[in-house]
Amino acid sequence: MHNRKQQIPNIADARPDPEVVPTAKRRTFSKAEKLRILADADACVAPGDIGALLRREGIYSSHLATWRKQRQLAGEALLVEGKRGPKVKPGAAQDRQVLELQSEVERLRNKLRKADLIIDVQKKLSILMGLSTSDTIGGPK
């Protein structure tokens, strides 16, 4: 007679692995890769060669169509890798610098106005106290 424990499989062995698989990352192609693949695709002459190329590279035919269109519109300059997101305006840095300089000029003008006021008060105080002022035109300071 067989042992009953040997017939029942271990429940712990039947559980799936709890390891989480990392999510897939979007594949990006460098300019050199795009140009190489386009050159390989342009060299295909026999029927089925392009399909084999697509399977070998792991890309879709829409990739080839998009890259060919980009190459046709702007030569090979548009194939350059671009960052996603809002585009930076070329004059934005210059505009920002102009605004910073304008605010600094306004701050310095306010500071000069206060300094002039303090100097005027000091002159009036020295006159009231009878101290000599050497602030005459052409005289040393």
Image: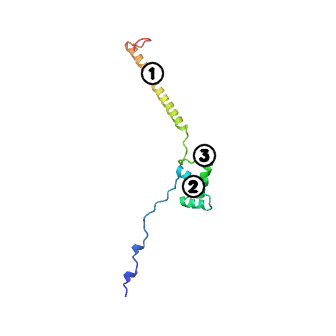
- Mark 3 residue crowding within 10 angstroms, few (<14) / some (14–19) / many (20+): few
User: What SS does tag 1 mark?
Assistant: helix
**Which numbered disc, 1 or 2, marks the residue closer to the eye?**
2
User: What SS does tag 2 mark?
Assistant: helix
- Mark 2 residue crowding within 10 angstroms, few (<14) / some (14–19) / many (20+): few
Amino acid on which the number 2 mark rests in the picture: Asp
Displayed quadrant of residue 19:
bottom left
Instruction: Please say if 7 is above or below 55.
Output: below
First of labels 1, 3 by sequence position? 3
Which residue is tagged 1? Answer: 116
First of labels 3, 2 by sequence position? 2
The residues tagged by marks 1 and 3 sit, at their Cα atoms, a distance apart of 62 Å
Where residue 111 appears, as percent x and y from the top left, is: 45, 26
User: What SS does tag 3 mark?
Assistant: loop
Instruction: Please say if 80 is above or below 40.
Output: above
Amino acid on which the number 3 mark rests in the picture: Gly
